[in-house]
Amino acid sequence: MVKYSSRDKLVAGVPLGGIGAGKAELNPQGKLVNLTIANNWVVPIKEMRGFHIFIKPAETQAFFLQRESRVRGLSNLDSELEYEGIYPFTYIRSRKQTLEANVCAFSSIVPNDIHDSTLPAFGISVQVKGSRRGIVAISAANIHGLDPFGNDMAGNPVGRVNERAANAVVMRNYRISESDPTKGNTCLIAQKPDRIISQYNLNLPNSEALKEKLWKDSFENTEPWRSLITGSDFAEDIHEVKGLWDDPACALVSKYEGSEELRFAFSWYCTGKWIYYPYGHYYHNNFKGSLDVAQYFLKNFDKLRTKTLEWHDTLIPHNLPEWLKDAIANGTYILSSSTWLDEKGRFAFYESTQLCPCLGTIASLCQEAGSLPVVLMFPELERSFLTLLSNGIAEDGYVPHDVGLHSLDLPSEGTTAPPGWKDVNPTFILLVYRYYKFSHDQQFLRDVYPKLVKALEWELRQDRDDDGLPELEGTGDTGFDTTPIRGPDSYTSSLFIASLRALEKISQELGEQEMLDRAHSLREKAAKRFNSLYNGKYFRAWDGEPNVGDAVFLGQIAGEWWRAILDLDPITEEEKVKSALESIYDANGNASPYCTPNLASRDGKLVEISSQTYSSWPRLVFAASALAYRRGLPNWSQIAKKEWDNLVRQGLVWDQPSRIDGRTGRPDPERYLDHYVGSAAPWTFCFPNR
């Protein structure tokens, strides 16, 4: 597992929440941060003020499992924490004299079970070792009506109220607008609460705050916690909020004996629709509200935890090094942080939730890499996305770059289109065949076949000199959209050849002999031209402008990645692929101490044509590393580990950027692009070695 301490400042923690349900993160300081549970992927709630895990052993002083808790006058009860994460599990440990307190928070991701993998909830278990008895309390705040942009005066905080339920508190707002994304309810539940504080004000008493000139979010009210420390009564105050100094929170208190495990769950159920996200959630089909969700989660706590743990063991190969297993499991975080699944079952990944919120972006190892775990665990979701994408294909056969900006209904041509990108159509063909390869869903293949033919025809029209390969126009018309390449490039060409081979396989499956013969002929012509790019050591980056001389391109054999996953015929001779990988290792692998950039001179220097050339794409590095691993090239493990270690060192494990600057080792620019869809690329190592 990836390990940090409470002194480490991470960009993000392990995301907790089901597929398409939004998420919250429990970070190394023990705080609940970056909440996107209210349809607010693009503007997360930075922190749930008032969330605490509090322990009072019978033998020693009480303490918060939190650093910098900001509870007025109780900073001496804060803790230093040890933090471990392996998606979708977070482990926090605090050691106090002879005591050890352990927390496990997790969300449910169960292969082939959409119902249990889309729960808008996460579970929390707490164990205290070295203590005879004591209490554990968990608190949460009412966020309904608080503006996710961070200005709670811009939302509608008036109308909030907390209501007691069986073993739980449900938080809602009765006066909230229908268009407020936080409309709905949240719930905190305990398996066996001894005491429930349904509602208290997070803020200090107004007279005290005015006297000390403190704004309401400077510190939190001490009284509920002092009552737990002293064992005295605390009068809860259940009422509908009408004043702006009133921030309602709740706390559930459970007693423990020895090292027994105490269980809690936090759930949400948001129905507000706003301009960015005018959809309902899939979980609306299965539950009536957050209490319903919380009760289900707690009732099935053991099953959900066990089934979620299983895929770490059954889908990730045992013979891989531990750091790579960590990279694979944690790369799956985008299932919680970056997915939409609406009430109709329409599914898509965000390319980047905050900085490029296009849904369903394909090409340049976006959806292709991000959906690797989906293909293995939830193939019906991949089918849903491909149906969306195919419905967006233009009359002329152009496949959209994505299905919409903040939308599942507004396909777009691409960030730098027009003209249309030359790598999206081959990618679509390959995505369809990959789905069929692992699902054997021939009916879907038959239904989408006419659109595959249209996609091929569009791509063929991009071969303007009839040499067998599509030409780029120098306008950023591929996934390398800030690099103005003109002429045939090895990246797009290798994809095109792989897609033709996939189309041969599809035609064979469907008995389309004419297309089978045509695709075979086109592939032979394209392969001949592609091989002319080979210089005896590797494939040239491109023939045309800008002139990069003998620079070595990391993306030169992207089509080989597809070939390996799909067990297709080779796109070129094996010795050329192996030599290309060795050349990339020598040049790109030595061009930066932090990462493996996309373009490097043969003597290992960065080529600075654009930010995309002097930076690495972690997804492409992991993909190439897996190809080398299949061929038994041992040094390549150092390339992948260098990329992973850099992400871990900077706290980017659960918010990976699209690219890393080879000069600095930092995202380029800062956090560009966040929560990137290609983060799941290490899953390439989980596909059978062909």
Image: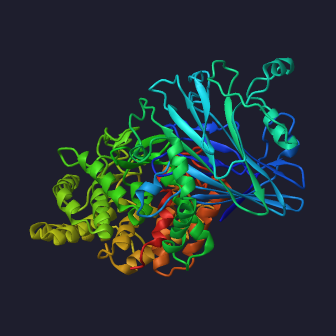
Tell me which colouring the rendered structure shows. Answer: rainbow
Q: Tell me which residue sits at (46%, 41%) in the image.
A: 356
Residue at the limit of the structure toward the left, as seen here: 514
Q: Tell me which residue sits at (50%, 31%) in the image.
A: 183
Does 42 sit left or right of 567 as displayed? right
In the image, residue 150 sits, relative to residue 309, either above or below, namely: above
Q: Which of 644 and 82 lies nearest the eye of the viewer?
A: 82
Res. 379 visible in picture: yes
Q: Which quadrant of the structure image shows residue 542?
A: bottom left
Q: Tell me which residue sits at (62%, 73%) in the image.
A: 322
Does 328 sit left or right of 278 as displayed? right
Q: Position of residue 604 (x, y in %)?
A: 57, 65
Q: Which quadrant of the structure image shows residue 198?
A: top right
Quadrant that contains the C terminus: bottom left
In the image, residue 69 sits, relative to residue 18, either above or below, namely: above
Q: Which of 485 and 136 lies nearest the eye of the viewer?
A: 136
